[in-house]
């Protein structure tokens, strides 16, 4: 006879309840243990030697950033500091990673080299996870006066992030298309909206039925791009999605309607844009569009594109106004709670700022420092002739927005989900313009009533 | 009939009475110990998060805002009554499901019949037809983003050779075409799995039954309709259920290709949940997840009633 022990159902339930209670009790206990455990403390101390750097860039910028981090690591090794930087490019998906570490309250990077970062900067700033850089940078002797005018973004007088590449919107023009249409950028550039439309019309190709087969003016039929173009038109007229104080709106008016009409005319009356176009970068790079409004981040890939002969020009004026988008690639620290790590992170930001001339020369972007802008390698970089409109956007004071919202994905300079979704209803013929603006107004105001936007100054 | 040790060839332990009846034997404990790793894994990574999610759905929890408050059913009420984007995502998801499920089931069955018939090329075809299923959603979506390009995609290129078909078809930028286009991608991707399930079911049907029906004078279609299909019923219900659940959870193509556009016409429920997560609104996002679960349960229940599950002995 086998030696069996009898277990009743009650015994099983008792055992399960005890095991579950034990597991639940172990969770806070383990957290408390980890907080006070000297081994965990030592591990954190050792980890001070490795700073985590996250980047959110495509190529070639991601590889170039990695190279500069490697250079800094070599410097640290030569100095014998015992600190190293570990680089990780998270593109796309950095927002989700940041949300995950925020939820876990653990795993924060020390430094982030962002794309623009505007979709998530405000919520982490208001959440207290992105501290002001000034205390750290002041202590290590950061050269604030080396920054060019317009390159600092301040919230209540404090810099929570620095710009390592400045950006603005500009016009990209396919010179082969222009030459074929008999247009000369030197003698008659598309400087005003009226001249830009003449250029676009002359360069548009249409089939026998009048359908656009090659857009004279690249404009997609949905998504962030028409939203950004609408925003540019709106700002040229003096409007904006949010008021300067970030508490109200300034688009549900004649300016907002006129901006919508302008875009719809590109598809309908002027017939210079193909509403079915989706991938704008692909269409521009493969020569299937003649004029493309975008940012200077397109310069590098355009230069690499074989057979693409192009020029750039500043954004066109319209009814007395000229608008652009003053932004830049942001770098910031996250509050890891460890002062040693934050000081070490500040040292890297200082060093990188001192080498932004070399970085931007290679990346094809715009250097925000005086010393970097004067370097021969930067002045003579291949993208230099194309970057002038970016400098003009800052030097000539084009209109641009100066606030963003903690719910960053909502607005994010007209790429935001609320703006694109509501305006898509117009481009797709689902709603009349006024109806769409009314609905958008309602949605935006509801969000602002919950939390106003975060305003910053540009200095 | 008396059950005896000799009859069964094993030792029989008679049941005890009251609280001390034999519920777990030593062998039972050994068996449960083998299940324990999975149970722990399930508890930590499935059951625990699920319970947490249910709890969060009754709060206004935001990852970065202090002070989570219990709000009762407020999130659910808002979703059902005052969130047009969520309503649109439900409609889109049901539309997508209505296309995907019948297509993958019917095409999968037809392909399985072809493979099972052992016609010329069936072995090679089996590999080719199943191959898409092993690709990741990222690869599939990126490839199909190119295939569905409005002007230079392969689909437009070949269709435009048909007289009357335009040379520019906005598969992904037209509100009426975007969800069918994503469904087309998913049909290509997932039909191989349905095919394999049906193939297993077909190979489980005794040949004698097929031969007997032919001897009785049944044609090919009659054999299929009156013999094969009824015997495939368990596999059919399984395939429909699995495809239903997978289609209700669609996310990848929306995230990679369309970002929910145009005009939220490719928002799925899971994509909407993801967008709430990106806004760090965990309480609201959790309520979306729970509602999705209830929707899937309801649809599965309806399916069970309509098809009236029958298990074969």
Image (tube, rainbow, N blue to C red):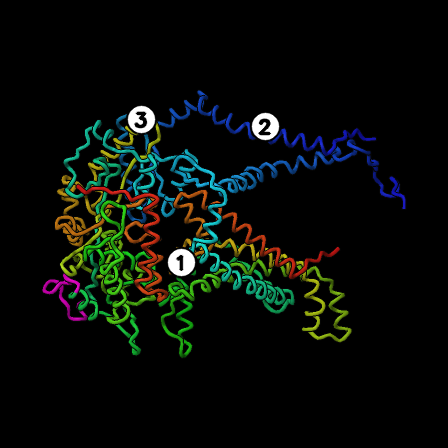
Identify the residue at the far top of this view.
A38
Question: Same subunit under labels 2 and 1?
Answer: no
Host chain of mark 3: A
Locate residue A438, reporting x and y percent.
32, 58
Task: Please state the extent of the stretch shown in magenta in the rendering.
Answer: A178-193
What whole-number distance in Å separates the C-alpha atoms at marks 2 and 1? 47 Å
What whole-number distance in Å separates the C-alpha atoms at marks 3 and 2? 37 Å
Host chain of mark 2: A
**At x 30% / y 37%, what residue is drawn?**
A70
Host chain of mark 1: B
In the visual, does B238 lie left or right of B259? right
The answer to whether B190 is drawn above or below residue A146 in the figure is: below
**At x 42% / y 68%, what residue is drawn?**
B155
Q: Is residue B33 magenta?
A: no
What whole-number distance in Å separates the C-alpha atoms at marks 1 and 3? 45 Å
Q: Secondary structure at mark 1?
A: loop
Quarter holding residue B237: bottom right
Residue A339 - label = 3
Locate residue A409, reporting x and y percent.
34, 48
Quarter of the image with the N terminus of chain A is top right
Verify CB contact (< 8 Å) between mark 2 and mark 1.
Answer: no
Verify CB contact (< 8 Å) between mark 1 and mark 3.
Answer: no
**At x 19% / y 43%, what residue is drawn?**
A458
Locate residue A262, reporting x and y percent.
24, 64
Q: Is residue B153 visible?
A: yes
Q: Secondary structure at mark 2?
A: helix
Quarter holding residue A137: top left
* Mark 1 lies on residue: B264
Q: As rendered, which of B27 and A446 lies closer to the eye?
A: A446
């Amino acid at each position: 006879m086998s030696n069996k022990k009898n277990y009743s159902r009650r015994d099983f339930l008792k055992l399960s309840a005890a095991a579950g209670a034990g597991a639940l009790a172990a969770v806070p206990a383990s957290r408390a243990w980890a907080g006070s455990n000297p081994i965990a403390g030592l591990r954190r101390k050792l980890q001070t030697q490795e700073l985590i750097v996250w980047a959110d860039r495509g190529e070639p910028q991601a590889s170039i950033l990695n190279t500069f981090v490697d250079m800094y690591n070599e410097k640290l090794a030569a100095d014998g500091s015992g600190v190293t930087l570990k680089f990780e490019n998270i593109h796309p998906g950095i927002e989700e990673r940041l949300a995950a570490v925020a939820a876990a309250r653990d795993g924060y990077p020390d430094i982030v080299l962002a794309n623009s970062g505007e979709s998530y900067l405000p919520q982490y700033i208001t959440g207290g996870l992105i501290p002001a850089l000034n205390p750290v940078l002041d202590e290590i002797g950061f050269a604030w006066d080396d920054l060019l005018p317009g390159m600092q973004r301040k919230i209540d007088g404090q810099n929570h992030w620095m710009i390592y590449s400045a950006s603005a919107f500009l016009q990209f023009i396919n010179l082969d298309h222009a030459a074929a249409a008999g247009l000369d950028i030197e003698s008659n550039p598309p400087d005003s909206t009226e001249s830009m439309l003449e250029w676009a019309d002359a360069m548009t190709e249409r089939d026998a039925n009048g359908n656009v087969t090659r857009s004279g003016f690249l404009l997609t039929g949905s998504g962030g791009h028409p939203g950004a173009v609408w925003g540019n038109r709106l700002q040229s007229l003096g409007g904006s999605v949010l008021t300067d104080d970030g508490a109200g709106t300034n688009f549900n008016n004649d300016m907002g309607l006129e901006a919508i009409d302008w875009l719809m005319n590109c598809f309908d009356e002027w017939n210079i844009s193909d509403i079915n176009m989706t991938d704008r970068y692909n269409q521009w790079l493969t020569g299937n569009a003649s004029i493309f409004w975008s940012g200077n981040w397109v310069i590098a890939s355009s230069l690499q594109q074989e057979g693409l002969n192009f020029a750039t020009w500043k954004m066109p004026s319209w009814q007395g106004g000229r608008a652009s988008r003053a932004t830049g690639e942001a770098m910031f620290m996250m509050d890891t709670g460890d002062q040693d790590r934050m000081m070490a992170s500040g040292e890297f930001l200082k060093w990188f700022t001192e080498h932004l001339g070399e970085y931007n020369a290679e990346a094809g972007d715009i250097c925000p420092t005086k010393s970097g802008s004067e370097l021969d390698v930067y002045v003579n970089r291949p993208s230099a002739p194309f970057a002038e409109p970016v400098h003009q956007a800052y030097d000539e004071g084009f209109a641009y927005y100066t606030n963003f919202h903690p719910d960053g994905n909502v607005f994010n300079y007209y790429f935001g989900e609320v703006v694109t979704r509501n305006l898509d209803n117009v481009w797709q013929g689902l709603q009349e313009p006024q109806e769409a603006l009314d609905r958008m107004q309602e949605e935006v105001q509801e969000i602002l009533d919950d939390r106003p936007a975060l305003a910053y100054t540009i200095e | 009939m008396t059950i005896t040790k000799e009859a069964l060839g094993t030792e029989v332990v008679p049941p005890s009475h009251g609280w001390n009846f034999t519920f777990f034997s030593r062998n039972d404990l050994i068996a449960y110990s083998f299940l324990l790793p999975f149970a722990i894994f399930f508890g930590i990574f499935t059951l625990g998060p699920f319970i947490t999610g249910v709890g969060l759905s009754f709060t206004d929890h935001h990852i970065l805002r202090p002070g989570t408050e219990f709000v009762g059913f407020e999130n659910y009420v808002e979703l059902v009554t005052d969130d047009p984007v969520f309503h649109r995502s439900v409609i889109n998801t049901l539309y997508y499901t209505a296309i995907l499920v019948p297509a993958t089931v019917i095409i999968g069955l037809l392909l399985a019949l072809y493979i099972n018939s052992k016609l010329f090329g069936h072995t090679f075809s089996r590999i080719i037809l199943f191959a898409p299923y092993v690709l990741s959603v990222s690869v599939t979506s990126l490839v199909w983003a190119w295939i569905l390009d409005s002007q230079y995609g392969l689909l437009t290129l070949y269709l435009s050779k048909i007289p009357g078909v335009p040379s520019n078809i906005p598969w992904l930028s037209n509100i009426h075409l975007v969800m069918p286009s994503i469904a087309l991608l998913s049909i290509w991707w997932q039909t191989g799995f349905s095919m394999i399930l049906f193939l297993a079911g077909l190979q489980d049907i005794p040949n004698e039954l097929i031969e007997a029906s032919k001897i009785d004078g049944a044609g090919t279609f009659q054999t299929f309709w009156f013999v094969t299909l009824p015997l495939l019923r368990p596999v059919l219900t399984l395939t429909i259920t699995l495809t239903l659940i997978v289609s209700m959870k669609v996310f990848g193509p929306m995230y990679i290709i369309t970002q929910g556009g145009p005009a939220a016409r490719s928002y799925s429920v899971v994509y909407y949940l993801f967008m709430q997560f990106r806004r760090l609104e965990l309480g609201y996002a959790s309520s979306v997840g729970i509602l999705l679960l209830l929707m899937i349960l309801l649809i599965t229940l309806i399916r069970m009633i309509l098809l009236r599950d029958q298990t074969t002995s």
